Image (spheres, rainbow, N blue to C red):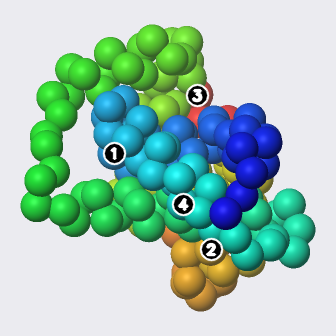
Amino acid sequence: MRSGKEVDRAIDMYADTVRRLCTVYLKSYDDTEDIFQNVFIKYLLHSAPFSSPEHEKAWIIRVTINECKDFLKSLFRKSVPIDDILELQAENADAETSDVLDAVLSLPKKYKDVVYLHYYEGYSAAEIAKLLRKNVNTIYTNLARARGLLRERLGDDFE
């Protein structure tokens, strides 16, 4: 079990990453907060050392993705009105960012994951392939297709 100091440090470093990733998957503030707690409880209970900060971050992202997937598979999943999603986005982003976020959130799931990890977290295609357990060429293809869809939806605002 990790110390409270280690957990506090991890929360300081990875809180935004976990919340953004949960929002991409769940589109609900309340569900995001639940998964956020679960991720850091697992971190607290995980006693194995990490070989590097990158390994620790990858572990946090993988646990977050798995927690979100498990939540979405659960029978007790609740639905969230689209108005709540749009309200949350409006509170947390300016108009231009909100348009881009809306476009990213409207992408099919397989594209959302790679776009988020590549553009928001700065992972390379090879690193994303390892995280998502996919072929690196699949990641390149998904990124290219996602960029095409975003270009169609955003027009001049794409760049």
**Residue 75 vs residue 7: left or right?**
left
101 in relation to 108, above or below: above
Left or right of residue 66: residue 132:
right
Which mark's residue is nearer the viewer, 4 or 1? 4
Q: What amino acid type should be assigned to the residue bearing mark 2?
A: Leu
Which residue, given by chain and number where applicable, does mark 3 sit on? 157
Q: Position of residue 128 (x, y in %)?
A: 66, 70
The location of residue 84, given as percent across then percent down, is: 25, 22
- State the residue position of label 1: 26
Q: Secondary structure at mark 2?
A: helix
**Quarter-wise, where is residue 62 in the image?**
bottom right
Residue marked by disc 2: 131
Nearest to viewer (mark 3 / mark 4):
4
Q: Position of residue 119 (x, y in %)?
A: 68, 48
The answer to whether residue 85 is seen in the rendering is: yes
- Near mark 3 (Cα within 10 A), the count class, few <14, some 14-19 or many ≥20, is few
Earlier-in-chain disc, 3 versus 4 = 4
Disc 1 element: helix
Q: Quick one: label 1 or label 3, which is nearer the N terminus?
A: 1
How many angstroms separate mark 2 from mark 3 (CA)?
A: 29 Å
Q: Place residue 94 in its image quadrant.
A: top right
In the image, which disc is placed on residue 42? 4
Residue 86 is drawn in which quadrant? top left
